[in-house]
Image (tube, rainbow, N blue to C red):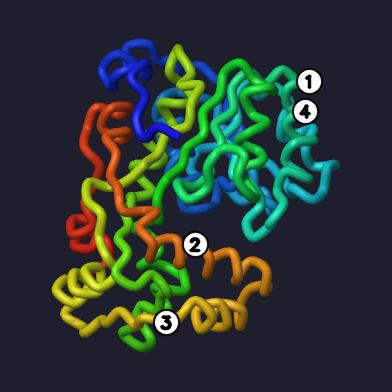
Amino acid sequence: MPDSVSHSPSGSESRAQSQSHRTVLVTGATGTTGGRLVARLAALGCEVRAASRRATPVGGARPVRFDWYDPATHAEALHGADGIYLVPPVGDRDPATVVLPFLERARAAGVRRVVLLSSSAIARGGPAVGQVHDALPGLFEEWAVLRPSWFMQNFGGEHAHARSIREDGVIATATGDGRVGFVDAADIAAVAAHALTDRRAPCTDLVLTGPEALSYDTVAAVLTRVTGRPVIHRRLSHEQFRDRLATGIPEEFAALLADLDRSIAAGSEDRTTDTVERVTGRPPRGFLTYAREELA
């Protein structure tokens, strides 16, 4: 899939074409990108429905109970919505089973535009969310698929990397010397806001990265410099990493994540794109800036 698409509007053009008076359902509204997107959409004047299992208030959005595995919660969430930010169920290796019937229902309810959160590691037609990506253009005339690289926020909060950094000063991966174009979740949310509200939908997939591709050795060195605490990158084999993950998550999901690390070691994520700047009109935040502003 292409990393940049020439027919997408520039940041200045798309801002001029913005349609702010939308009603947008944000699934995963309490998550890493969803919470940031809710705030952006509200600032643009959208009516935002923040969907989560417990109908948790997020910013000034209207909270609504939503559970992928409970279709009884879907009708209220969809009522009156014309756009959806779609975050598939986390950890489900076959999300299409629940997501595609929901999208059929959304189309019947009058939803016009859907922006799907996928991954740079999963192309259209690939496993898991790749199947949802493949079906989306046949369901909606207005759509976009965001395919971000790994999140900078994985090194903060309650992510496994963040916990191991705090507890042991270690980042454990099976990526070897592989490099990743880590991207800030705020930049993902900014692109999502444009994709949902610009007059013209992207109708393509958008690969999102930060401004540089970094190895985990380099990430560890940056964190050491910024926090003043020694952080090292511990290199594990594919099997060691899989077994480490499987102590806290289902074995199948652990195997999938270990496979992704092996792909990184082979160079699959060693790239950067201009998509964030092209869509938003400003460059993406770099990892050193993120670490200084949020982790120091």
Which residue lies at the image location 53% right of the left edge and 65% below the top edge?
Answer: 259
* Foreground pick, 32 / 178: 178
Tell me which numbered mark, 1 or 3, is placed earlier along the sequence. Answer: 1
Vertical relation: 110 (above or below) 33: above
Question: Which one is in front in this view, the residue at disc 3 or the one at disc 4?
Answer: 3
Q: Which mark is residue 143?
A: none
At label 4, the amino acid type is: Glu
Residue contact between numbered discs 1 and 4, judged by CB atoms under 8 Å = yes
- Quarter of the image for residue 290 reads bottom left
For label 3, count other residues whose C-alpha is less than 10 Å away and answer few (under 14), some (14-19) or many (20+): some
| The N terminus - image quarter | top left
Q: Is residue 286 visible?
A: yes
Tell me which numbered mark, 2 or 4, is placed earlier along the sequence. Answer: 4
Q: Which mark is residue 260?
A: 2
Label 2 secondary element = helix
Vertical relation: 55 (above or below) 280: below
Which residue lies at the image location 45% right of the left edge and 12% below the top edge?
Answer: 199
* Foreground pick, 119 / 156: 119
Residue 56: percent from left, percent from top: 61, 51
Task: Determine whether, in the image, residue 32 is placed left or right of residue 155.
Answer: right
Tell me which numbered mark, 2 or 1, is placed earlier along the sequence. Answer: 1
Which residue lies under the disc numbered 4?
Answer: 104
Which residue lies under the disc numbered 1?
Answer: 108
Residue 91: percent from left, percent from top: 64, 60
Residue 233: percent from left, percent from top: 30, 79
Between the residue at mark 2 and the residue at mark 4, the CA separation in whole angstroms equals 30 Å
At label 1, the amino acid type is: Ala
Which residue lies under the disc numbered 3?
Answer: 236
Tell me which numbered mark, 3 or 2, is placed earlier along the sequence. Answer: 3
Which residue lies at the image location 77% right of the left edge and 33% below the top edge?
Answer: 76
